[in-house]
Amino acid sequence: MAITDHLPRYPLAFLPTPLHSLPRLSAMVCDELQLPPGSRAIERLRSPRGLGTASSFQLLIKRDDQTGLAGGGNKTRKLEFLIADAQAKGADVVLTTGAIQSNHCRQTAAAAARAGLECHVVLSGAPPPQPNGNLLLDHLLGAKIHWTARENRPARLAELTEELRAAGRRPYPIVLGGSDPVGASGYALALEELWGQVRALDLKLDAIVFASSSGGTQAGLVAGAWALGWDVPLLGISVDEPAADLKAQVADLATRTTNHLGRPHTFTAGDIRVDAEYLGGGYAVMGDLEREAIRLLAQAEGILLDPVYTGRAFGGLLDRIRRGAFEPGQNILFWHTGGMPALFAYARELTR
Ligand SMILES: Cc1ncc(COP(=O)(O)O)c(C=O)c1O
């Protein structure tokens, strides 16, 4: 029995998502990152072995960019629980909020379409002359789009919810990133899925690395690890928050998620691993770190990252490898959380 079996779930994702090794990247990374000759990490990276061998250093990837819902991504797993909750509460319209290139809003619009619910999204900024990337997909998926200043998003979402209610509708507001205990349950279940995959391969994972922003993905993974009794290190690379803030946020949400799962546990900030060394020019500002990571993974393995989240997180992981943060013999898993449609909104920065 899965740890979320008692919770209502609306199927949206193609699961399990693939887990596979990155053999060419492991070989190329020595040249691309100019690791100093003679480092033990290089020797391990030069001789990647097949998936399942625990004796060699290897990079692996969990493909949540392939969840299958209108371009995929991590929000699909959260939305399986959020849409089911909306339906259980009799909602006929869902609302959420995000940045202009929000992957979360795009997947919410797709999930709502699948479930036959109306969808409103509150985006920050003003409409551009020509929508592209995720915003174009929001339009195609039939979302009703509302614009406001970034700092005004929660207030506008609350106001819109009241307007819909006053008009006789049954609205279900979803917080930024779907990061509440209902949404985070999707990542507790995801960790259980991965646990099954690694056990079937008789593989020991030494670290799981991923992008962390509104904290729901990390909180769900942390809650899932607690429920399963799996003590694998879960390292969130912060996309926009200082480490102390994100750790506190994740600890609080992980605590509330274990309550929601019926396996209560209290986490403190000290239990949460976050690296906030890669915030660069700020949220959604793409720099050399992201550009290099996107090109490297694309050209080594034919896998596309995104400019805002996974580009930053994978760039951070590569930098940590360069700085010798991992030991030879370790198996490091990068959890790809999606976001590819946003690449098209960064064509200028990516072709520089
Ligand atoms: C592609 C991608 N990766 C990672 C994240 C971060 O996930 P979370 O907000 O659950 O921390 C997001 C959030 O929007 C995302 O779109």
Image (cartoon, rainbow, N blue to C red):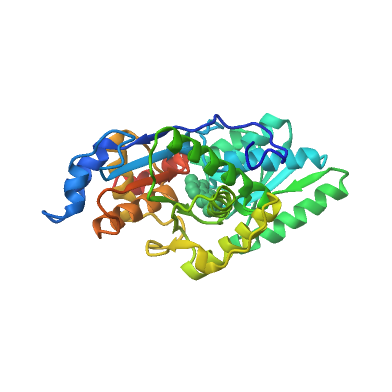
* Residue 118 horizontal side relative to residue 310, left or right: right
Residue 13 visible, this orientation = yes
Please name the residue shown 72% across and 43% down the image.
94
Q: Nearer the viewer, residue 27 or 154?
A: 27
Residue 255: where, in percent of width, then height?
63, 60
Question: Observer-nearest residue: 288 or 235?
Answer: 235
User: Which percent across, then down, holds residue 234?
Assistant: 46, 54
Residue 23, compared with residue 327, is above or below; it is above
Tell whether 266 sits left or right of 33: right
The residue positioned 64% from the left and 47% from the top of the image is 183
Res. 301 image quadrant: top left
In the rendered picture of this protein, how many numbered marks are placed on residues?
0
Left or right: 108 in relation to 282? right
Residue 21: where, in percent of width, then height? 33, 36
Closest to the observer, 328 or 162: 328
Q: Which image quarter: residue 340? A: top left
In the displayed structure, would residue 231 be above or below residue 151? above
Residue 321: where, in percent of width, then height?
A: 28, 54
